[in-house]
Image (cartoon, helix red, strand yellow):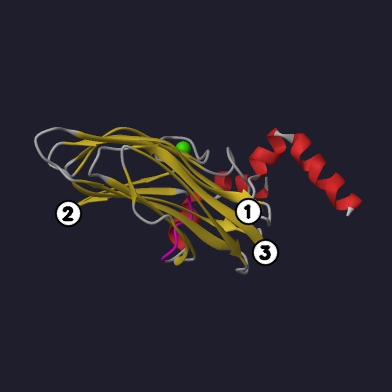
Amino acid sequence: MSRKILAFGIPVLLAFSAGSTFAVPTLTLESGSSTVTRTDGLDGALDGKIQFFGTVGNFTFNKVTAITDPIFGAPASPDLNLISLDVSSGLGGQLTVTFTDDGFTGSPLNLMATIGGTTGVGDSVQLLTYVNGTLLTDSGILGGPAFDNAEFASLINGSPYSLTLKAVITHSGGIEAHATSFGARLQTTVPDGGSTAVILGLGLLGLGTLRRSRNS
Ligand SMILES: [Ca+2]
């Protein structure tokens, strides 16, 4: 809540006082010599949500929606969410989608980076995450037509820190248009690598684990 008040109160000061780090959620789309940058608030609402439609280099975004605190997560429980990305290209090439936010305070904690979607055969997607610009997780190269991946990492950085979710999309190009669609997310998880969301959704699973612990 305090971060929300801060964001609404002095966004201009934040935007110009943070040096090399982004002070507000920022979505950067790069392909070839084309770069599009969208910060939260450019759409009139500092709500942790950024959307973009349009063309970047050879790629056309039907849609990309990026959401973080305060809609998803909080400074103490980070959640960077590329909730839906749908992009196509004719000539192909490489597209990099980067979603960054800072001011996170939860530490130490366990993070999980997940991605799932579809892309053309011969195309690929790679999901990378970073804390303060240092690599946290790497999905490796994921090929089409359908892909999914989950990577886990422990974060021990002092607060505040920044988190970045980066997707690298490569289209082979050719006669037919290529399309890629996926969701990707960096969020907190439990130490054993299980999904917090799954355990919350399946409460019985957690109870079962507790019972086994007590019985042993
Ligand atoms: Ca916004």
- Secondary structure mostly taken by the magenta-highlighted segment of the chain: loop
Q: Secondary structure at mark 2?
A: loop
- Check residue 108 in the rendering and tell me which mark sits there, or answer none: 3
Three-letter amino acid code at disc 1?
Gly
Residue 38 lies, in percent from the top left, at: 36, 44
Q: Position of residue 151 (x, y in %)?
A: 51, 54
Which sits earlier in the primary sequence, circle 3 or circle 2? 2
Q: Quadrant of the N terminus?
A: top right
Characterize the local packing of mark 2: few (<14), some (14-19) or many (20 or more) Cα atoms within 10 angstroms: few
Q: Is residue 31 visible?
A: yes
> Can you tell which of label 1 and label 2 is closer to the viewer?
1
Name the residue carrying label 2.
33
Q: Is residue 40 magenta?
A: no
Viewer-nearest residue: 29 or 93 = 93
- Place residue 63 in its image quadrant: top left
Q: What span is colored magenta in the figure?
A: 20-24
Q: Is residue 23 magenta?
A: yes
Q: Nearer the viewer, residue 185 or 199?
A: 199
Residue at point 56%, 52% (across, down): 112
| Callout 2 amino acid | Ser
Q: Residue at x 42, y 55 (%)?
A: 139
Tell me if label 3 and label 2 are in contact, CB under 8 Å. Answer: no
Q: Nearer the viewer, mark 1 or mark 3?
A: 1
Q: Secondary structure at mark 3?
A: loop
Percent across and percent down for residue 193 are: 63, 53
Q: Distance of mark 3 from mark 2, alpha carbons?
A: 38 Å
Tell me, for residue 193, which label it has, or none.
1
Number of other residues with Cα within 10 Å of mark 1, as a class: few under 14, some 14 to 19, many 20 or more: some
